[in-house]
Amino acid sequence: MYIVSLTYTRPMDEVDAVLDAHLAWLDKYFAAGVFIAAGRKDPRTGGVIIANDIDRERLNTVLLEDAFQAVADYEVTRVNVTRAADEFSALVGS
């Protein structure tokens, strides 16, 4: 799986201007099974997306569609899950 960390690079008014498009993009890829979870950082300096273990090139293509490309930097880390709580056991091996 992947952890995608977004850090805002533009003022919040610019982030808020593309927020609806970003949320629609998230909905699209949750429905497609690409994303597992997502949320804002606290304090609100960016966000985090947890993505399924898909082909990295496909993930890159998905990320390029995000409206936040204009207002944030992305850091992608691949994680090989080896342990998880019972309710998240499906993530082991991803």
Image: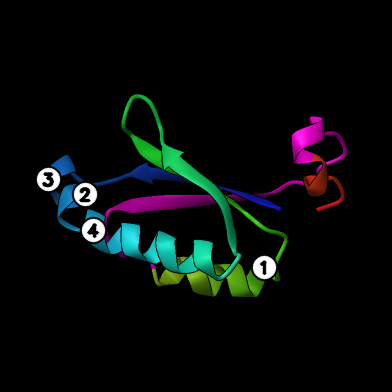
Any mark on residue 56, and which?
1
Q: Which residue is mark 4?
A: 20
Q: Which residues are magenta?
A: 66-88
- Please state the horizontal and vertical placement of residue 9, each as a whole percent of the image: 29, 46
Q: Which residue is mark 2?
A: 15
Is any atom of residue 69 visible in this view? no
Between the C-alphas of marks 3 and 2, the distance is: 5 Å
Between the C-alphas of marks 2 and 1, the distance is: 26 Å
Q: Residue at x 82, y 33 (%)?
A: 86
**First-in-chain label (3 vs 1):** 3
Label 3–label 2 contact, CB within 8 A: yes
Q: Residue at x 33, y 57 (%)?
A: 23
Q: Which residue is mark 3?
A: 13
Q: Residue at x 38, y 65 (%)?
A: 25
Between the C-alphas of marks 4 and 1, the distance is: 26 Å
Numbered disc 1: secondary structure? helix
**First-in-chain label (4 vs 2):** 2
- Please state the horizontal and vertical placement of residue 16, each as a whole percent of the image: 18, 49
